[in-house]
Each structure stands twice: as structure tokens, then as C-alpha cells.
Amino acid sequence: MAAKSLQEQLLGAGLIDKKKAKKIKTEQMQHKQKVKNGKAAPVDESARLEELKRQREEKAERDRALNLEKQRIAQKKAIQGQIRQMIEQNRIRKEEGDIAYHFTDDKLVKQIYISQAMHDDLSRGRLAIVKLDQAYELVAEPIAAKIKERDETYVLVCNNRLDDVVDEDDPYADFKIPDDLMW
């Protein structure tokens, strides 16, 4: 078995194509002719091999960076798909209500009309408002927490959960807030 030339090895490894191999061969022949005629200095093969090794390492590093970027994009798409699926499967059907609930979406004040029960649940943190494409959906607070773990830009309103805790030393315990009071 005969030893392969560097050019054949590079072709076999896929680092150069046939055109580039032919171009390199013609350049070598031209350089040999110039050296023979005394018009050029001889080429140092070890320096050339070092240059090829450096180029190969640079290409491998670029390929690694490109693969990491592709993986990051694929992971982001997978997370968006998971969020979409969670919202579609767990959205709560909005009841047409007469109470306007105002919230902000990217510095814009938006509103949805909901029932009193949903308004209470949103205020107490049992429900949350999430954005799916250009629509706003209501989901339960645990689902909103899972969505927030993956990407918090989808969750627009998720109040802290308040359970009706009665404080024994509350001086205003006898004064209840009226149900019809809107701020």
C-alpha cells in the first residue's frame, strides 16, 4: 500500500474539492519552475503543513459554533411549541362578562371583558392572562408558572396568589370592602 500524498489525504477528508486540488497542483508546478529558474525561494513544507493544520482547526471551530447556534434555535422552537401546547390545552373559556379587566401588553393598555368570578380569580392570583399569537387567553396559575419557567414574555398578568387569611389582630376586620367597589 503506497503512502498517499497530502493532497489525496485532504481530498479524502473532504477538506478540499477537486478544483482546489488542481489549483494547488498547478501553483506547486509553477513555483517549482520559478525555483528552478532562480526567480523564487524554495517553499518550507513544514510551514505549509502548519498553515493547513491551523486552517483545519479554524474550520472545525466555525463548524462547532454553527452547530451550537443551530441547537440553540431548535431548542427555542421546541420551548415555543411546548408553551403553545400548554396554553391551547389549558385555556379557560372566557365567559362574556360586563367587567373590563385592564392590563398592559408591551407598554400598551389592553382590556378584556370577563365575568365577576373570573375577575375575582385574576385578582386573587388563581388565574393568569397569557398571550398566544395576537390573542389573550386565561389559564390557571400553576400553568402560568410553568410557562413562566420556560419563557416569561408569554405571561402578561399573574398576580401573587392570595388566600383569604384572617388576621386576629386586624383592626379593620369588622369593615368589609363592598363587592361593587371598583378602583
Image: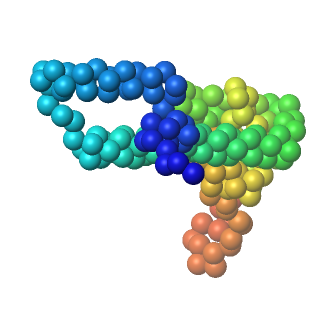
Vertical side of 71 occupied by 177: above or below: below
Q: x, y percentage for residue 117?
A: 82, 47
Q: Say whether residue 44 is visible.
A: yes
Who's the residue at 52% across and 25% down the image? 18
- Could you tell whether 35 is left or right of 29 in the image? left
Q: Nearer the viewer, residue 28 or 17?
A: 28
Give the color scheme: rainbow, by chain, secondary structure or one colour. Answer: rainbow
Who's the residue at 70% across and 55% down the image? 146
Q: x, y percentage for residue 104?
A: 57, 34
Give the quadrant of residue 76: top right
Who's the residue at 49% across and 49% down the image? 3
- Could you tell whether 119 is left or right of 2 in the image? right
In the rendered image, the quadrant that contains the C terminus is: top right
> How many numbered marks does the figure carry?
0
Q: x, y percentage for residue 55?
A: 36, 40
Who's the residue at 48% across and 32% down the image? 16
Vertical side of 49 occupied by 24: above or below: above
- Could you tell whether 47 is left or right of 133 in the image? left
Q: x, y percentage for residue 109?
A: 57, 28
- Could you tell whether 54 is left or right of 181 in the image? left
Q: Residue furthest bottom?
A: 168
Q: Nearer the viewer, residue 45 or 160?
A: 45
Q: Say whether residue 180 is visible.
A: no
Q: Nearer the viewer, residue 24 or 67?
A: 24
